[in-house]
Image (tube, grey):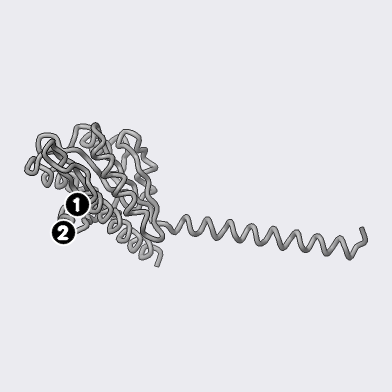
Amino acid sequence: MDKRSFLKEAGAASLAAGVLLTSRSSQAQVASDQARVLIAYHSVTGNTEKMAQGVADGAKSVAGASADLKRVSDVATEDLLSADAVIVGSPVYFGNVSGEVKTFLDNWFMKFGVFRDAKMRNKVGAAFVTGAAISNGKETAMQAIHAALIMNQMVIVSAGGAFGAYGASATTGPDSPGIDDKKLEGARALGKRVAEFAAIIRRGSRT
């Protein structure tokens, strides 16, 4: 191979490498610009899990947002720290959240260590619940979740309007329709609004 051919091939290889690096850098930038929504839930019968999936679908429908769906027992400290928003879901037990969700929220103080230094400050928070009866404490359970998030200096968001002022909820008893399309629509609306709000806050934090 003569010198001219060598230089020509070397130039082409250098150009290709530059294009590849630029592409990877752009992809990394897009990923870092995404608003990350963590949906943490507890479910025994599968009803709250179905609602959680609806919430995740709503969050993922927003351009520039991603959704991470995890049971509360599987959430790690890094999941909370890397999230721009946290949506907590629980079945209703005696007008309150389940013991597993209460333990998860209590762990923000000692196990996860995010409370003391206000590491969740200005992140977006929301709630969704499922309960067997129409009047069995769904709103009080969501307010219990809100209280924990507010004490961690988070910003509370709901879907609002016909979808509910406190969050998304579903009545799942024997005489109810269970997790039907209407309930899933409310779950998706909650996930979408939280993701939209988280994206706005994320953009604002970089300006």
Nearer the observer: mark 2 or 1; the answer is 2
Decide which of 205, 158 is in the foreground and name it.
158
Q: Which residue is mark 1?
A: 167
Viewer-nearest residue: 77 or 190 = 190
Number of labelled discs?
2
Q: Secondary structure at mark 2?
A: helix
Q: Residues within 10 Å of mark 1 (few under 14, many from 20)?
A: many
Residue positioned 64% across, 58% down in the render: 20
Q: Amino acid at mark 1?
A: Gly
* Residue occupying the far bottom of the picture: 207
Element carrying mark 1: loop
**Residue located beneath label 2 in the image:** 162
Mark 2 nearby-residue class (10 Å; few <14, some 14–19, many ≥20): few
Q: Is label 2 in contact with label 1 (beta carbons under 8 Å)?
A: no
Residue at left 20%, top 36%?
A: 102
Q: Quadrant of the N terminus?
A: bottom right
Residue drawn at x 31%, y 40% is 113
| Residue 70: percent from left, percent from top | 34, 40
Using residue 156 as the reference point, say whether residue 27 is left or right of it.
right
Q: Identify which amino acid the numbered label 2 is placed on.
A: Ala
- The mark nearer the N terminus, 2 or 1, is 2
**Residue 59, percent from left and from top:** 33, 54
Q: Position of residue 123 (x, y in %)?
A: 30, 54
**For the view shown, which residue lies furthest in the left direction?**
135
| Residue 144, placed above or below residue 190 | above
C-alpha span from label 2 to label 1: 11 Å
| 162 relative to 190 in the view: left or right | left
Q: Please state, as top left, top right, bottom left or bottom right, where the C terminus lies in the image.
A: bottom left
Residue 149 % position (x, y)? 22, 48
Write the residue at 6% across / 43% down.
135
